[in-house]
Image (cartoon, rainbow, N blue to C red):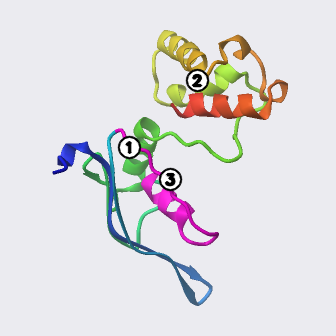
Amino acid sequence: MTNKKDIIIELKDVWKTYMMGTVEVHALRGLSLQVKKGEFLAIMGPSGSGKSTAMNMIGCLDVPTKGEIYLSGQDIAHMTESNLAQIRGKKIGFIFQTFNLLNTLSAKENVMIPMRFQNCPADKIDKKADELLTLVDLKERSDHKPNEMSGGQQQRVAIARSL
C-alpha cells in the first residue's frame, strides 16, 4: 500500500486542449500517473504525443484544460500564475535540451542565478554554488565561461544550476 506522503507527483485524468485557429488539438487525453519519492521516470513517445505538454504542466509552466495535478500533495492545477511561479522558483529545476547558460557569465555565476532570485544570503550562495559544481565534477572550471567548456561540461553546469 502506497503512503500518500510518498507520492511526489500525481496526475489524475489530465486533459490539455489547444486551439489552432478553429481546430481543437487534444495534446493530452486523460493522463493519469503517480511518481513516488526516489523513483525515476522516463516519459517517452513519438513526436506530438504530449510529452512536452505533460512536462510543462508538471513543471508549473502550463495548466490542464481539466484534471488534477499534485506536487507533494499540493493541488497545482488551479493555482494562480504567481503561486505557480513561487513553486517553480523553490521546488522545480529545469534541464533543457539546449543548456540556456548565459554566455557572459562564468559556470559559477550561472549556477548562482536561481539562488539570487530566491534572495539567499550571498555567503550561502557562494558556498552552495561551489558544492554544486563539485558535485558535477566542475569545481576547477567554475571561472570558465560556457564557450570555454565542452558540451558535456555545459550540460553539467546546467544540471548544477537546476539543483
Kindly identify which residue carries mark 2. Answer: 112
Looking at numbered disc 1 in the image, what kind of residue is underneath it? Glu
Q: Is residue 134 above or below residue 99?
A: above
Q: How many marks?
A: 3
Q: Residues within 10 Å of mark 3 (few under 14, many from 20)?
A: few
**What's the CA distance linking mark 1 and mark 2?**
27 Å
**Which residue is nearer to you in this view: 113 or 131?**
131
**Which residue is nearer to you in this view: 110 or 151?**
151
Looking at numbered disc 3 in the image, what kind of residue is underneath it? Ala
**Residue furthest out toward the right:** 148
**What's the CA distance linking mark 3 and mark 2?**
28 Å
**Residue furthest out toward the front:** 1
* Mark 1 or mark 2, earlier in chain: 1
Q: Residue 102: x and y, percent? A: 73, 33
**Residue furthest out toward the bottom:** 22
| Callout 2 secondary element | helix
Residue at the location (53% across, 68% down)?
Answer: 50
Nearer the camera: disc 1 or disc 2: 1
Kindly identify which residue carries mark 3. Answer: 42
Kindly identify which residue carries mark 1. Answer: 39
- Magenta part, dominant SS: loop
Q: Residues within 10 Å of mark 1 (few under 14, many from 20)?
A: few
Read off the magenta span: 38-59
Q: Is residue 84 above or below residue 20?
A: above
- The answer to which image quadrant residue 92 occupies is top left
Q: Residue 123: x and y, percent? A: 50, 9
Q: Residue 110: x and y, percent? A: 65, 27
